[in-house]
Amino acid sequence: MANLVLPDAILVKNYISGDESALASLIDRHQSKIYRFVYSKVKDRDVSDDIFQDTFIKVIRTLKTKSYNEEGKFLPWVMRIAHNLVVDHFRKAKKMPFQRETEEYSIFNYLTDNALTVESQMITEQVEVDLKRLLDELPQDQKEVLVMRMYQDLSFKEIAELTGVSINTALGRMRYALLNLRKIIEKNQIILTI
Amino acid sequence: MAKLYSRKKLVPQLMLPKKETVYFLLNFSKALTTNRIGNVLIEIIAN
């Protein structure tokens, strides 16, 4: 019995007409070449499988929607699709590089995290509570200027206008507030560091 | 006799995708039907 080897064009025509076994023949005939081509670029079997699959999904979609023009160039067409998908893969990998940890190299040796640890956060919060208590020890006018300057971020001009005093008086009250705060901290041997 | 130099093959001669990949593609093809209505293309994948 003679073995009939149908050319690609006939297999494609049969597939478009509804013969699913024609697709199996086409894949069987060309899978090695296409897969080897993809693997030679990406050097990863799993990625090669994905790209191979995506290639043929596009092929199937194009043939099923009868958008394919048969010019006797089935394999070059499929290879072109595979090539474009390889390019897309590298573009995506470039935008989102994937780091694999190895024994010699760990990305966490280079990545830094500047966020406060929970411990630092708790200390910061405690320091702020202590500071507020210390402010209550100050005379009212000094406390007022300090709060407006440090917590409300007002300029001395604005503080002077709001409190009805001159800028020099506001500056003086601020200076005395800081001096008194230091005295209280030293007297009570308080530690306010993060 | 002259020495024969041949380029070392970077990829083995016979490399194939996984059987599951091919199996998926064949099933995908069987399940897919398309319909074009005017400018709209509808793809139906039957389970």
Image (cartoon, coloured by chain):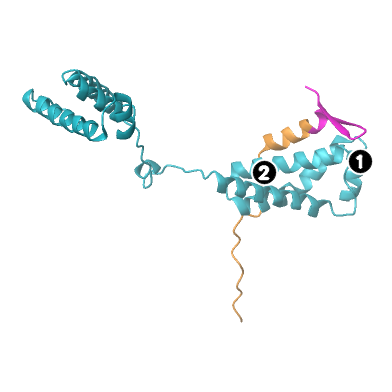
x and y percent of residue B27 in the render?
77, 30
Chain for mark 2?
A
- Give the CA separation, mark 2 to mark 1: 25 Å
x and y percent of residue B9 in the render?
61, 61
- Residue tagged 2: A51
Taking the magenta stretch, the answer to whether it contains residue B8 is: no
Of the 4 image quadrants, the one containing the C terminus of chain A is top left
- Residue tagged 1: A14
Quarter of the rendering containing residue B1: bottom right
x and y percent of residue A128 in the render?
25, 23
Do pointers 2 and 1 mark residues of a single chain? yes
Quarter of the rendering containing residue A144: top left
- The answer to whether the residues at label 2 and label 1 have Cβ atoms under 8 Å apart is no
Three-letter amino acid code at disc 2? Ile
Letter of the chain shown orange in the rendering: B
B27 sits to left or right of A187? right
Question: Counting residues from the N terminus, which is met first, the one under dot 2 or under dot 1?
Answer: 1
Categorize mark 2 by other alpha carbons within 10 Å: few (<14), some (14-19), many (20+).
many
Q: Is residue A147 above or below residue A36?
A: above
Three-letter amino acid code at disc 1? Asn
Q: Is residue A1 visible?
A: no
Categorize mark 1 by other alpha carbons within 10 Å: few (<14), some (14-19), many (20+).
some
Q: Is residue A177 above or below residue B7?
A: above
Q: Secondary structure at mark 2?
A: helix
Taking the magenta stretch, the answer to whether it contains residue B30 is: yes
User: Magenta region: which residues?
Assistant: B29-47
Q: Is residue A132 visible?
A: yes
x and y percent of residue A120 in the render?
27, 28
B13 sits to left or right of A20? left
